[in-house]
């Protein structure tokens, strides 16, 4: 038995307190699943402006939402820590367990593997538009359903497919987390933008003023290690950089098992799962984007 641990918290991405708690919990639990682990315990992390809400009604609903997701994941909330803050912040420190021989890192992708992504992209654009009051309700609803979906779906399926490596896609976007996998594994990841799964309605929001600051920093972060090939669709490139909240898993899996993995994921409820690229022997660029 080995222990895996992670921590994550952030300000609200939606106006509904209960839903925000659910999203924050699913996001925090995600790293445990990416490592092949099973979450066991969690600690609340809270920053709260009690001067704006002395009765702490929002906080009650936030914690209730987070508890629902943790309970669904089979994790027990042991307690936590709260501080006064000018802005609400919420998340968890999560502890999980994993068999040492089943542990997956983001630094073990192998040349010849296929890359499978388990959730659609675009939560950054959608939540930013939502904050501005410019996001259609149905678009937000679909994004929220994706954000609260636990990545245990991906964990179970990737073990059955004998995956070599995995990482969850969150604040650094697909670009940043792909780069970390390429760098850690000493390989090059080739990604086809046309294959990227996008949340319905997100394409209409992938422009200013809904491009987050993180999109720019993610682009700047990977730019020295990125090579664009052919005529690249600038709109889809924005999705490559878009910071995700509670995004899916990026899984490096033997090529022969990739189609079966996608089929398994979709049967389990990860309906946007698809192959988005492949792992190559290390080249002069860590990322090749077509």
Image: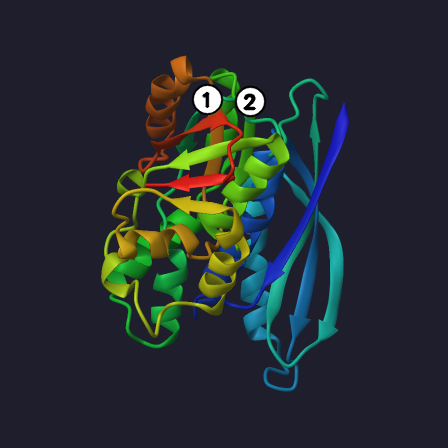
Q: Residue 147 at what x, y percent from top left? A: 43, 51
Please tell me the numbered disc located at residue 236.
none
Quick one: 188 or 28, which is closer to the camera? 188
Q: Which residue is mark 1?
A: 113
Q: Nearer the viewer, residue 271 or 283?
A: 283
| Res 88 quadrant in image | bottom right
Q: Quadrant of the C terminus?
A: top left
Question: What is the count of numbered marks?
Answer: 2
Please tell me how crowded label 2 is: few (under 14), some (14-19), or many (20+) other residues with Cα within 10 Å: many
Relative side of 151 to 194, left or right = right
Q: Residue 287, image x and y in percent? A: 47, 40
Residue drawn where x is 35% and y is 25% of the image: 262
Looking at the rendered image, the disc whose residue lies closer to the viewer, 1 or 2, is 1
Report how far apart the C-alphas of labels 1 and 2 lie in the structure: 8 Å
In what element is the residue under mark 1?
loop
- In the rendered image, residue 126, in percent from the top left (x then y), is placed at 34, 62
């Amino acid at each position: 038995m080995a222990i895996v641990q992670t921590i994550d918290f952030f300000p609200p991405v939606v106006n509904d307190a209960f839903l925000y708690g659910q999203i924050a919990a699913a996001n925090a639990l995600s790293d445990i699943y990416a490592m092949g682990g099973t979450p066991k315990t969690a600690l609340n992390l809270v920053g709260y402006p009690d001067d704006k809400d002395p009765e702490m009604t929002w906080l009650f609903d936030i914690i209730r939402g987070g508890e629902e997701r943790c309970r669904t994941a089979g994790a027990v909330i042991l307690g936590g820590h709260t501080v006064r803050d000018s802005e609400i912040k919420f998340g968890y420190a999560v502890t999980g367990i994993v068999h040492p021989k089943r542990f997956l890192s983001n630094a073990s992708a192998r040349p010849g593997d296929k890359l499978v992504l388990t959730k659609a992209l675009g939560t950054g654009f959608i939540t930013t538009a939502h904050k501005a009051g410019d996001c259609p309700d149905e678009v937000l609803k679909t994004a929220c359903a994706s954000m609260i979906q636990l990545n245990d779906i991906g964990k179970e399926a990737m073990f059955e497919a004998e995956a070599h490596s995995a990482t969850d896609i969150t604040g650094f976007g697909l670009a940043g987390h792909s780069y970390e996998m390429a760098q850690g594994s000493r390989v090059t990841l080739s990604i086809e933008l046309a294959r990227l799964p996008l949340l319905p309605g997100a394409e209409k929001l992938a422009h200013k003023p809904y491009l987050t600051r993180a999109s720019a920093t993610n682009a700047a972060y990977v730019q020295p290690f990125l090579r664009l090939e052919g005529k690249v669709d600038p709109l889809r490139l924005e999705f490559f950089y878009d910071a995700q909240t509670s995004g899916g898993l990026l899984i490096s899996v033997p090529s022969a098992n990739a189609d079966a993995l996608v089929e398994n994921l979709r049967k389990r409820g990860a309906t946007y799962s698809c192959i988005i690229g492949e792992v190559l022997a290390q080249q002069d660029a860590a990322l090749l984007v077509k």
